[in-house]
Image: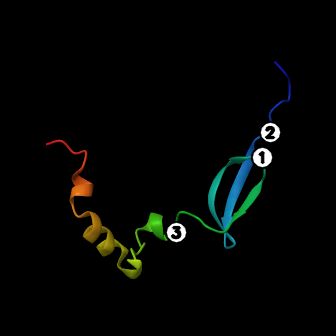
Amino acid sequence: MQKDLHPKAVPCKIIYQGKVVLETLSTKPEIHVDVWSGVHPFWTGEERFLDAEGRVDKFNKRFGTGYRNRGKTE
């Protein structure tokens, strides 16, 4: 086995908007992030579904419910 092949893991602080949000191990002592799961709409449950130009209605009109039920066995 080769010695000193892997970099050293040091305690790391994940920083979002100037605040430490997570402490972990990494090869860098600090990591600054733009998006964090604690504020991302998908993970906080605040995501809004937008039907752009009636695409869902257009899909349902074209394929109906048969498309969703295809492959299901009862």
SS of the residue at dot 3?
loop
Give the image location of residue 69, x and y in percent.
22, 52
Asked if the residue under mark 1 is in contact with the one under mark 2, i.e. CB atoms within 8 Å, the reply is yes
SS of the residue at dot 2?
loop
Image disc number at residue 14: none
Residue located beneath label 2 in the image: 8
Distance Cα–Cα, label 2 vs label 1? 6 Å
Amino acid at pointer 2: Lys
Give the image location of residue 15, x and y in percent.
68, 64
Nearer to us: label 3 or label 2 = 3
Distance Cα–Cα, label 3 vs label 2? 31 Å
71 to 48, vertically: above or below: above
Residue located beneath label 3 in the image: 40
Residue at the image position 72 percent from the left and 47 percent from the top: 26
Q: Residues within 10 Å of mark 2 (few under 14, many from 20)?
A: few
Residue lying farthest right?
3
Q: First in sequence: mark 3 or mark 2?
A: 2
39 to 10, vertically: above or below: below
Asked where in the image residue 3 lies, by quadrant, the reply is top right
Amino acid at pointer 1: Thr
Asked if the residue under mark 3 is in contact with the one under mark 1, i.e. CB atoms within 8 Å, the reply is no
Asked if the residue under mark 2 is in contact with the one under mark 3, i.e. CB atoms within 8 Å, the reply is no
- Which corner quadrant holds the C terminus? top left
Amino acid at pointer 3: His
21 to 56, vertically: above or below: above
Q: Is the image coloured rainbow, by chain, by secondary structure, or in one colour?
A: rainbow
- Which corner quadrant holds the N terminus? top right
Distance Cα–Cα, label 1 vs label 3? 25 Å
Residue located beneath label 1 in the image: 27
